[in-house]
Image: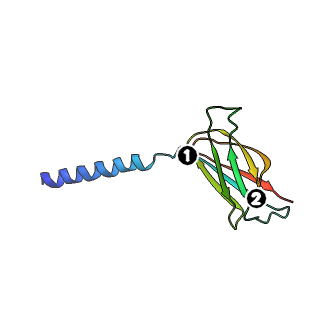
Amino acid sequence: MKIRAIATLLLLTGVIGFGFISCKKSKACKVLVRVQDTLEEPIPGVMIRLWCDDTENPLCIIDDTATTLSDGTARFEFANPAILKVYADGNPEGYVELEAGEEVEKIIEYP
């Protein structure tokens, strides 16, 4: 009888402990860049570059590129919040502000 009670207690403790661990939120900063034409059709094959200018912020060393997929999207993930410049095929397209634990979407419209 004592063994069954101890086993039940251990199982219950394990389930509760796993519940606390599995609820831990990710703090990653994610960016979804969507490139589309004026009719909102996706444009694949566009080179997207996200980077921070080290003259404006010498502590930021982010410089990452990706090519849009067939659905016109490119995804990025970074460890820390920052403000990044966005370029599409070498053309400046503004900025994105990364937020901890959030995904930011940037829509770029090509003519």
| Amino acid at the residue labelled 1 | Ala
Q: Looking at this view, is 3 or 31 the one in front?
A: 31
Q: Quadrant of the C terminus?
A: bottom right
* Residue 40 position within the rendered picture, expressed as x and y whole percent measured from the top left: 80, 63
**Which quadrant is home to the N terminus?**
bottom left
Q: At which x and y percent is residue 78?
A: 58, 46
Residue count near mark 2 (Cα–Cα under 10 Å), binned few <14, some 14–19, many ≥20: many
Using the image, determine if residue 40 lies above or below residue 107: below
> Which residue: 79% across, 47% down?
92
Mark 1 and mark 2 residues within 8 Å of each other at the beta carbon: no
- Tell me the number on the disc at residue 28: 1
In-front residue for pair 30/90? 90
* Of pointers 1 and 2, the one earlier in the residue sequence: 1
* Residue 2, numbered circle: none
Amino acid on which the number 2 mark rests in the picture: Val
- State the residue position of label 2: 35
Residue drawn at x 76%, y 65% as measured from the top left: 42
Q: Residues within 10 Å of mark 1 (few under 14, many from 20)?
A: some
Q: Give the percent coordinates (x, y) of residue 49.
A: 70, 50
